[in-house]
Amino acid sequence: MILPIIIVITSLFLDGILSNFFPYMINDLSLFTPYFTIISLIIIYPFFQKKKRNYYILIVIIGYFYDLLYTNLFLADAIFFFLTALIITLIYQKLEINIFTNIFLMLLTIIIYHTLLALSLFIFNVVPITINITIYLITNSLLLNIIYGEILYLICKYLPHKRHLN
Amino acid sequence: MYRKRKKRKKIIIIAIIVFCSFFVLFYSLSSNRKLTTVESFFKDAAMLVMKGVMLPFTSLNLEKGEDLTESYLIQKNLNVHLEEEIEQLRDTLDLNQTLTGYTPINATVITRNKSYWYQTLTIDKGKKAGLKKNMVAITKNGLIGKIEKVTNYSSEIKLITANDVNNKVSVSIATTNGDTTAILSGYDKETNLVLISGVDSMVEIKEGDVVTTSGLGGMFPRGIYIGVVETITNDKYGLSKTLGVKTSQDFNNIHYVTILGEEKE
């Protein structure tokens, strides 16, 4: 139980630290746009296979703190994280946990998160949303996050722990 | 019968959750939402933790003089960071001397909004330092935005690059025939230019004309530098012009800001 919490909290802070040093303007975003917190949701799932309720509770709490620290919204990311977690659970019920399904899920999660956010902003007409920029945001967040996710996956897999990933 | 009732109950619960989620999202995403006391308290606590986490990255000065590592490359990089930081702080001090009408409050950027659509920054000063909503945020390169939300120990700055319908600044363009006023109303993400729309097509504007705040509307003081006109396009009816303004500020690289506080008596 402690390891997944450490993973999520570390990812949450790393997200903030790194995003302070990478370009911020939409058109200047580098391929290293961090979304480590969202990626950590996939990595910690196997630790909660038998306690899904704890998984969802942890995700909503982390989503709330993500909102407080990085988006200044109220529970919006908690909802997005929860929906993402539901999809992760559904897919992991059908697929085996390995390095490839991990990559596939990371791709899917980033796409779902950006799409949900863009859709919500579009529905509630907060800021002008364009499909091109949404795609640009997605493509620019894949590389670094997949590398980070794979490193975390391997660390979790080879760490001496009571419950291994497989 | 029991199964049917259970299924119906499940559907009702899901429908309630979906409805609540929509309501929360609507409330959360609305731009004029005010922070509740509980939210402010949690935000302050979270920001204090974040400030602690960011401390080694924002105040490298504390480590000055210590032999952190023997690696020449790491030392060299640290020195570059320190020089940049000293330069930014020196510029901020120079800036303070020119702002005689207002109480300048210097602050450090703690985090940036991870939702890139919003274009906001969070700084480490809040109500306790005398900050209030709608106070103006500047750097040595000119206007960057205004305070949108304030808690006791942190504030959120909305940048002028945010494409928000409420994000409008009254500006003055210094032309050869005198000043003309217009509204800064958006940002072109593709060209990285701030947009000024609705300028009368009869007014002669040239590339390189300086744009500053006009002071009209009462929110932004007069004379804060914004940038220079880089592109001029006419609308299809030839009635008005849209100007693209190049700012001197690198919005990717804002670590220190100055807030114009209360007016001095």
Image (cartoon, coloured by chain):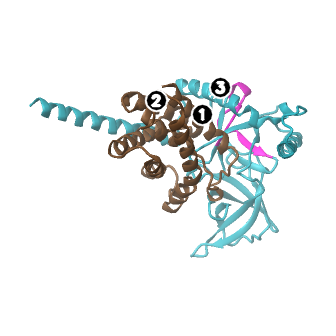
Asked whether the viewer can see residue A153, the reply is yes
Q: Residues within 10 Å of mark 3 (few under 14, many from 20)?
A: some
Q: Is residue B78 left or right of residue A127?
A: right
Q: Nearer the viewer, mark 2 or mark 3?
A: 2
Foreground pick, B220 / B195: B195
Of A10 and A128, the residue lying toward us:
A10
Q: Is residue B146 above or below residue A68?
A: below
Q: Chain of mark 2?
A: A
Residue B125 within the magenta-colored segment of the rendering: yes
Residues A24 and B195: in front is A24
**Amino acid residing under circle 2:** Leu
**Residue at mark 3: chain:** B
- Tell me the amino acid under the disc marked 1: Thr
Q: Residue A46's spot in the image, x, y percent?
A: 43, 36
Q: Start and end of the magenta stretch? A: B121-139
Which chain wears cyan? Answer: B
Q: Which mark is residue A10?
A: 1
